Amino acid sequence: MSTVALKDVTKIWPDGTYAVDNLSLEVQDGEFMVLLGPSGCGKSTVLRMIAGLEDPSEGEILLNGEPVLELPPRDRSIAMVFQDFALYPHMTVSENIGFPLKLSGVEPAPRQDRVGAVAGALGIGEVLGRRPSQLSGGQRQRVAMGRAIVRRPGLFLMDEPLSNLDSGLRAELRAEITSMTRELGVTTMYVTHDQAEALTMADRVAIMRKGILQDCGTPTDVYRRPATLYVAAFLGSPKMNLLEASVYVHLDQYIALNFGEQTLYMPWNDPRARAITRYHGERIVVGIRAEALTPVTPQTPGHILQGRIRYLEHHGHESLAYLDIGATAIVVDEMGGPVQDQAPPEGALKRIGGALQRLTRPAAPELPVPPRSRDRVSLLNDPGRHARKPAELAVRLAPYPQVSPGHPLAISVRMEAVHFFDERGDRIDVGWR
Ligand SMILES: Nc1ncnc2c1ncn2[C@@H]1O[C@H](COP(=O)(O)OP(=O)(O)OP(=O)(O)O)[C@@H](O)[C@H]1O
């Protein structure tokens, strides 16, 4: 039995960098929790604090309900596997896996039994007598996992364990890791920047950006109802269409979402209508995934956008059309660098609250400093703070469709699958999850 709880955990490096900012997260017994986010967002630092390799600057970490910050790493019943694992080159696979048991004084016979069982579960029972140099990359990673798991830890921490492997092997090991950890019932925290890995492996996914937790839920939750604009932009391929819209409320009738040249009308009986009423006369971000869009004949009634194909991408099993619809797209910064509290250098490019800004003056007081606890500032109302560009609406088409760039295309929008975000990037919706 092993549970993990992080309470208001912050890690500030000596240079002032916030690697992790006020993180609270609970992992249930036997759960497979994936920490997902771009490079530098603080994922590894979270694992290292749980393992006891780093101390938090603030906050509390509990294992099985007990505070562990005073406990040295070896007493935490944790096993960790990294991207760059090191096996002992002069030892056989069997000796490598059994080494932690030997260190803790387990007799050779039971040791051999446990090594055999773990190697069998990992599909490396046939190579127990080989040395690491005689193994493939995938086999070596399995040995590293075997060595970590053989002590039957309460908690398994994995930091991008598959990132050095080729894509075929990654997919294969993905399935093996999840079935192994579920079979053993061991609580697992798994770090990756690969959304496919996160969505296929996790019971729940925690998505981080610049040290701040953005969302946490099942893969279906975070994909279908992302809590923030950032999560909406980060998950999914093709990327979610994020369009700037002006809101006009016609009480008891409908809400008009104006994209510049075109308007969608949300009926008044839509459960989200009341929440959007607050934004009358303001701009919001409307998020539409490609799967919520269907090409239709031009005169089809309903929620229709008229567009013109700008370019096509053929992916074999489908084609993607990118349409000019006369709208403006919001570009969300995906960089995962931590929040810097220092004044940036003159003329530097600094990303603030999801936006890219060229700073012409060095004066820190004039900078729009994001609120410390919430890395969000207005995305829409200050032209200096966000990137916008003409929208290219991504739409799925059949493979090799009979259309070409320049072709007009009418698109039906499934309104119930549309997402709404406010100027700070928070989801607009009531009781949404
Ligand atoms: N020992 C350290 N001293 C100072 N800064 C550090 C230290 N370790 C990490 N950082 C910084 O803290 C931030 C978070 O790093 P961390 O390794 O946790 O990110 P990550 O999300 O795991 O990234 P990656 O996927 O690239 O490993 C980064 O900006 C990193 O440069």
Image: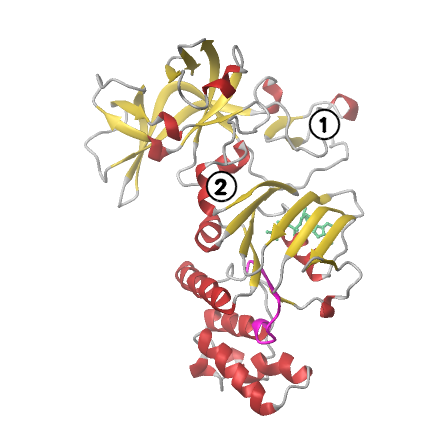
Q: Is residue 154 magenta?
A: yes
- Is ligand 1 within 8 Å of the beta carbon of the residue shown at mark 2? no
Identify which residue, 161 or 131, lies in the foreground: 161
Element at label 2: helix
Q: What residue is at 39 percent from the left and 61 percent from the top?
A: 168
- Is ligand 1 within 8 Å of the beta carbon of the residue shown at mark 1? no
Precedes in sequence: disc 2 or disc 1: 2
Going by the numbered disc 1, the residue's amino acid type is Val
Locate residue 317 relative to residue 359 in the image: left or right: left
Image position, residue 177 (x, y; %): 48, 64
Q: From this viewpoint, is residue 92 visible?
A: no
Please say if 62 is above or below 125: above
Disc nearest the viewer among 2 and 1: 2
Query: Are discs 2 and 1 less than 8 Å apart at CB?
Result: no
Identify which residue, 419 or 385, lies in the foreground: 419
Please say if 345 is above or below 204: above
Q: CA distance from mark 2 to mark 1?
A: 28 Å
Q: How is the image coloured?
A: secondary structure
Q: What residue is at 55 percent from the left and 65 percent from the top?
A: 186
What residue would you read off at disc 1?
369
Q: Is residue 150 magenta?
A: yes
Specify the quadrant of the image occupied by residue 49.
bottom right
The residue stretch that appears in magenta:
148-160
Residue 222: numbered disc: 2
Q: From this viewpoint, is residue 151 visible?
A: yes
